[in-house]
Image (tube, grey):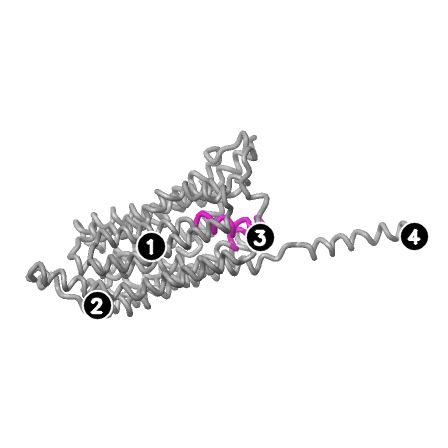
Amino acid sequence: MASGEITAGSAPLQSVSAVANAPNYRRPLAIVTTLFFMWGFLTCLNDILVPHLKSIFDLSYAHVMLIQFAFFSAYFLFSIPWSKVVNVIGYQKSMVAGLLCMTVGAFLFVPAASFASFPLFLGALIVLAAGITGLQVAANPYVVVLGKPETASSRLDLTQAFNSLGTTIAPKLGGLLILSTTPLAIEELRQLAPQALHAYRVQEAASVKMPYIVIGVTLLLLAGMIALSKLPKIEHAEYRPGSAIGDSIWKHPNLTLGALGIFAYVGAEVSIGSFLVNYFGLPEIAGFSAKTAAGYVSFYWGGAMAGRFLGAAILRRVKTGHLLALFAVCTSSLVLFSMLTSGHIAMWSILAIGFFNSIMFPSIFSLGVAELGPLTGNGSGILNMAIVGGAIIPLIQGAIADRIGIHHAFFVPVICYLYIFYYALSGSKANSERYATA
């Protein structure tokens, strides 16, 4: 009888023990979230560099979009190498290495501004983005596997919300610090003698120095904090040689089609954000100065932040693919509406796209790495490599804008959003269908 009582009582004791031993990932999640904020802030500062350097160096839209091309091409160049680094040294050390690389890139803005050299600015952006690539390759999948698989999209969406907090603050703060003076008109620039023109460019570029010095110091401190933190290892997602024999990332269609989804999403989001300051400066839209327009760009990124905080809750109740499809319809419709209208209606409709962009990256990413197991690190490398869409799509839209104007060049993002709609309803299910028929 006594033994029976002990046996009956062991079940609840085991369940209590299981709950007590369940890992609490709140602290490591909070630490990693700071990284999402930083790379969001730095990425969005490019939207301020675009109009600033365009006026300083008298660049066409196609040429100034080399800023985004240089920045986002780093994802294509360095994502796969970073995934190898993650496999060798793990997620945490890779985050530290990425932060140190970003620090170097931030400090390189000082000589670029001192020499007023556009190529040096592009070089600094590539180094900075190379470090951000390392963070993305390590941090995104780390958040996905840092908890229950069924809440992965919600978890990544929540951390991406703090990424959006960075992108919301950056345009306003960057506009105040970098766009603090009114640049000379193009006609005045072209009348300056070579020496006077160079002196003017050095003077205008100097506004970039202090913000990036502060950023560099902050990144260095963050690297130290991450290095000293005790982040848990996620054993089932750690790469082990021979653990994925017979499997390959190329056998997971949801990953490869998801990479195209990331390409399309980042390309559309960056393309829209890059043109907002100049778009709002058009007489038929708002006629704002660059500094005033920069303040409004915060609404675009602030909408994404609000959408991600809200989306983190919604994604716990609604299927990721369904919500992604709905938001893709909303973004494409808003872009078309802005193209067909003018004035403040066109301005606010393009700004509203930020809200519906919100859940796209975490949703596509979590659907893309689903069921990869030990291949998660390699899969993350592929998905982050696809962020190169932020380099290519803006360049294409810039070339088109030089020919038909900014207003109607926005049809390029519409095409991107239509592909995301396809991935949400069909492409993301390819892997589960493969397992069902296996």
Identify the residue shown where x is 20% and y is 50%.
63
Q: Secondary structure at mark 2?
A: loop
Q: Earlier in the sequence, mark 3 or mark 2?
A: 3
If you read the primary sequence from the N terminus, does the residue marked by circle 3 or circle 4 appear first?
4
**What's the residue at 26%, 66% (across, down)?**
178
Foreground mark, 1 or 4?
Answer: 1
Q: Earlier in the sequence, mark 1 or mark 3?
A: 1
Q: Which mark is residue 105?
A: 1
Disc 3: CA contacts within 10 A as few (<14), some (14-19) or many (>=20): some
Q: Whole-Å distance between the Cαs marked 4 and 2? A: 84 Å
Q: Which mark is residue 232?
A: 3
Q: Tag 1: residue type? A: Gly
Q: Is residue 253 above or below residue 264?
A: above
Which picture quadrant has residue 236? top right
Image vertical order of residue 261 relative to residue 51, above or below: above
Q: Indicate left or right for 89 with 399 as reference.
A: right
Return the x and y of residue 214 as percentages of the image width and height: 35, 65
Q: Give the mark nearer the N terminus: 1 vs 4.
A: 4
**In this orientation, which residue lies closer to the viewer: 123 or 415?**
123
The boundaries of the magenta stretch are 136-155
Which mark, by number, is residue 2? 4
Q: Which residue is mark 2?
A: 289
**Residue 122: percent from left, percent from top:** 26, 52
Q: Residue at x 39, y 58 (%)?
A: 40
